[in-house]
Structures are given as C-alpha cells and as structure tokens.
Amino acid sequence: MEMCSEVGANLQRGMNFRLRGTDIIILMSLRPEAPYADRVEDEGRLLIYEGHDCAKTISGPDPKRVDQPTRHAGGSPTQNGLFAEAARRYKEEQAPPERVRVYEKIRSGIWAYNGMFELIDGWTEQSAGRQVFKFKLRLAGTNDHRHPSCSFFPPVANSRFRSSVILMIFGKQSFKTMKPKNDFHVVDQVKFSPRTMILSRILSFAKVLFCLTLICLAIAGRAQGQPSGRQVVNQSIQWLSLNSNIKLNKKYGLSVDGQFRFAEYGNMQHMIRGGFDYYVTKKLSVVPIGFSYIQNYLYGKQPASFVNNERRLWQQIAYKQTVSRAARSRITVPKA
C-alpha cells in the first residue's frame, strides 16, 4: 500500500521504523473493531500506541495469546524492538526523540494524516494474560515540510485529532482522495457539495419544525377545556426506565427492560420485559418474540375500581444510525 506519492514505498504493516532509511510511519485506528488498543490522551496531544503481534501462521499459535515479540527467530529486532530501542535512547538522553508521522484509519480504505509526533517512551504491560508493548508519542507541534500533509486540515497543534473532525462531517461533504497504484486512499481535501449542504439544511430545519410542533401540541392539549361535570385533579407522575442489551455472540443477544412508574411517589405501574435479539446487520436488529409482565396498582387521587395486571407478547425492530463519532440515534418500531 502507498500512503501518498510523497512516501514512495509500500506499507505492508502498521509500524514502519526508518522506512527508506529516515522515515518513521505508524498506522493507527481508534475504531471499535481495531486489532490494537491505541488511544489518545491529554485532549489529543499524546498518543499511546500499542505494539504489534507476531505474524499469524497456519501451524503457529494465536498471535493474541502470546507475548508481543522483541526479536525475530533469527535474532534481528522486530518493529517493537526497534521502537523500544529508540525510546530507550531518548529517555537515557543518548539521542533526540524520533519523529513519527501518524496516519489514522477513519473508514475502510480511507486514512487521515494526524500530524508529526515524537517518540518519547516505551514499556511493556500485562494485557489479557500476555505482555504487550506500549509506546508514548507526543505531538511535535510542527509539520514535516519534506512530506506534505495528506490531510485537508491545516497543520495546527490543536487539542483534537483531525480525523475525529473528519468523522463528524463525513457524509456531508464529498472527499477528494489521492488514489495510488493500490486500493489505498489518503484524504487530500474536502469539497463542499451544494446539493448535500442544501439537504443538510433542510433536514436541520425539519428537526426544529418537528420539535416546535410537539411543543405546540402539548400546549394546545393542556389549554383545551374539560367537559362539564368531569372531575380533574393534578398529580405528579414519575417514570424510571432501565434498558439493557446483552450480546451473546455476533448474531444473538438478549433485551431486558424494566419500567417503573409512580404517581405522587406511590406505585402506579411496573413493567418487566425480555426478548431475544437477532442482529441482522451491525445496524439492524430484530426481536422476533418477547414477553412482558405489567403490574398495575390502584394509584393516585382517583384510583380504578379494580387491578388489571397484564401479560403481553411483543416484537421490535431497532436500527442504529451514526450521527457523529460520539452520538447515535436509535429508531425502534415495537409491536405489542
């Protein structure tokens, strides 16, 4: 793979120490399905990068169950060993920190240049019963002018990874990418599409209009007069809802919900329900069958003449749509 024409080399691994003699490049990912536990600290100024496992072979052990190697079988250092030695030299004041260019995967086949970092520390720690390498990199604060940034954001040392900004606006703009010989794209710049901008504004206006409509309906309903002879009382209602999804494997799971409703802080109605989840895709799940039990009480200032507890079967369709990197909306279509 090629990052861009300035790299001039195929990247076959995530850690690349002294590529072509001088360049040091790492590929990272903060996506949930990423194979390594990379993370950012200090509002994006520090990167904690996890070392890489041994190569997977047909007859060899599972790379995720053995310690990350420092040396190959022939004795030469692995990428973990090279990075660890560079960090050691800096800590012992034998050499300046190595400068590392960091690229982050934001979608399949699309990477963002996060800037120039300095390798300042390295250590091993216990993780899932094995030893893994961790490397600390500090934002250098300047860009590498010999290799222009492949990101469309200006090279500023702000407190956020630029790829997180890319994800927040992804889908609202059209990306211009550099496509080298292989199927590997690096974001170069963003062009604002007039059509997508108009659609985005229409959607935002529709959301505001919908909220205002709900508020007006609530006010209008409260303002309507009551029929003559009907007794009306004011009492407070409290609701508490607990919802959980337990994933058993990639395809099946459990949905367990509890709703507890009170009138004037006394028991009103309690409901417990459970069902089997079937994950059609990563975004779409279905509850084909579920059971709910509803316990009703004689509550409030005008209680009913008798208690009628309920037992119901229910079904549900749930669809998850990513709104931004940190927010999701869930649309459910239950059927009692």
Image (spheres, grey):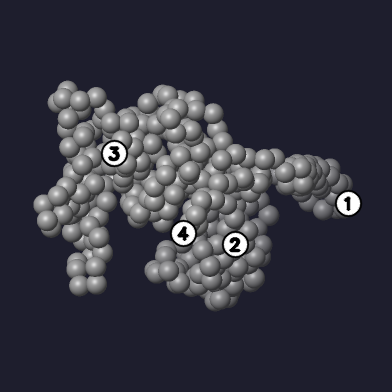
- Which of 235/103 is in front? 103
The local secondary structure at tag 2 comes to strand
- Which of 87/3 is in front? 3
Q: Could you classify mark 4 by the number of other residues whose Cα lies within 10 Å: few (under 14), some (14-19), or many (20 or more)? A: few
How far is the residue under mark 3 from the one under mark 1?
Answer: 90 Å
Quarter of the view holding residue 138: top left
Q: Earlier in the sequence, mark 2 or mark 3?
A: 3
Residue 32 x/y as whole percent: 42, 53
How far is the residue under mark 3 from the one under mark 4?
Answer: 52 Å
Q: Which residue is mark 3?
A: 21
Residue type at mark 4 is Ser
- Which of 128/226 is in front? 128
Mark 2 or 3: in front is: 3
The local secondary structure at tag 3 comes to loop
Q: Is residue 175 left or right of residue 326?
A: right
Q: Which residue is mark 4?
A: 244
Residue 108 x/y as whole percent: 50, 55
Residue type at mark 1 is Ser
Give me the disc on residue 319.
2
Q: Could you classify mark 2 by the number of other residues whose Cα lies within 10 Å: few (under 14), some (14-19), or many (20 or more)? A: some
Identity of the residue drawn at 25% across and 60% down: 55
